[in-house]
Amino acid sequence: MKPADRVQRVPPSGIRRFFELAEEKDDVVSLGVGEPDFSAPWGARTAAIESLERGKTSYTANRGMRELRAAIADHVERWDLDYDPAEEILVTTGASEAVDVAMRALVDPGDTVAVPQPSYVSYVPGVTFAGGEPLPVPTHAENDFVLTPDDLASAGAADADALVLCYPNNPTGATMSEDELAPVAAFAREHDLTVLSDEIYAALTYEGEHTSIATLPGMRERTIVFNGFSKAYAMTGLRLGYALGPADGIGAMNHVHQYSMLSSPTTAQYAAIEALRGCEDDVQEMRREYDRRRRFVLARFREMGLDCFEAEGAFYAFPRCGGDDEQFAEDLLREQSVAAVPGSVFGAGGEGHLRVSYATGMDDLRTAMDRIEAFVDSR
C-alpha cells in the first residue's frame, strides 16, 4: 500500500525519536514533554464524573455545546476578544484539531503559508497535509525570537496567502507585546494574509498581559484564534480546544469538522464548562508554580554559563547549547540521563538550542539542573 506523496514528504517527529531513546534508559529525568505535571482541577473532574453518572454520553452539536460556547465567549473577554457563541466559536478535539481543520478549511492546494520558526512541530506538516506549501520564516535568538516584518519580508512572506503565529511560543517561551505585534499586523493587512494564531499558552504569560493579534485594528476579520484546555487547565488527555473567528471562517472549519470529527468529546465539554466557570483559582495556582520553576531554571542556566534569553510565557526554556544540538541532547541523555529536545527539530532558528520543559516537579528539576551542570562542566 503506497502512502500519499504529501504524507511521505513529512518526516517522522524529531521529538518522538528522543522519547524513544529515553525509554531505553533507566532513571531518566524528562524535560522533553510539553505536558503539565498537575492533574486537571478537581471541579472539572467532578463535572466530568457527574456527566457520566447522569448518562450524558450522546453526541453534542457539531460546534460544541451551546453552554460551553457561551462560557468560552465570556472567558476570552479577559483578552478583549469578542465573539458570538452561535456563529464565531467552534469547539474542537484539542487545539491541535482546530489548527488542522483551519488548514484544511482555509488553505487551497498550492497556497503558501508562512510559518515562523522555531515553532510547534505540527504546523508545517499541517500545511503539507492540506496541500499547501509551507514557507519557513526564521526568528532569531538575538531578538528574543520575536517575529518582525523584516523576518517576514526576507523570507518572502509578502507573497504568502496565510501566516501562522504562536505566542506565547512553543518551543522558545517567547511572547510578543502589543507594540511588537502591531507591525506584524500591518504586514498582514498590507499583503492580505489570513492569520492563524495559536494562543494555547495565553493564560501562561508571566511578564505583562497577553495580547491577541485579533484585537489589533483590521485583524479580527482576517484572524482565526486557537486556544484550549490542555495547558492552562492541565486537561491534556480530555482533548478539548476551540477556535474563534469571523463567521465565514468558523463556518468553513465546522464544515470540515462535522465530517471528520462530528463533535468533540461530550464528557470533556462538561468538564470544560466547570473549568471556565469555577477553576480560575486552580489555574492561577499552577501559573504561579510554573513561574517559580521558570525563574529557577533560567537562573541555573545562567549560572552554568548557558546563554538563555528571558522566556516570558508557556513552560519552556530555550538555552543555547552551541554546536550540534542533536549530539548535545543525545550525549546528555546517554551520560546524565536527562532528556531534552534539540532545538533543530523545531525548524530554522532552533539550531544550537535545547527545548527544556519546566512542567515537572521541583525535585526533578533540581536533579536535572544538577546533572546538566555536571555535563556542561565535563565538556
Image (cartoon, rainbow, N blue to C red):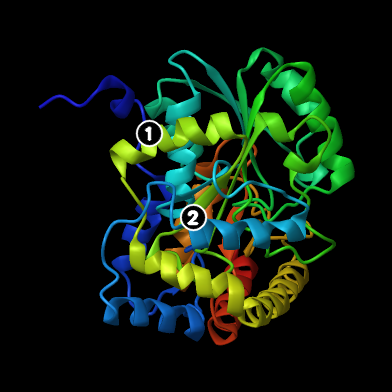
Q: Residue at coordinates 63% horizontally, 73% vertically from top-left?
A: 373
Q: Please state which amino acid type lies under the numbered disc 1.
A: Val
In percent of width and height, residue 208 lies at 85, 62
- Residue 235 drawn at (x, y percent): 46, 69
Circle 1: is it few (<14), some (14-19), or many (20+) Cα within 10 Å? some
Residue nearest the viewer, comparing 253 with 111: 253
Image coordinates for residue 300, horizontal then vertical, percent: 72, 74
Relative to 51, residue 72 above or below: above
Q: Which residue is mark 2?
A: 241
Count of numbered circles in the view: 2
* Relative to 20, 195 lies left or right: right
Nearer to the camera, 203 or 310 = 203
Which picture quadrant has residue 116? top right
- Amino acid type of the residue tagged 2 in the rendering: Gly
Q: Nearer the viewer, residue 272 or 297?
A: 272
Is 139 located above or below residue 30 in the figure?
above
| Residue at 62% from the left image edge and 34% from the top image edge | 246
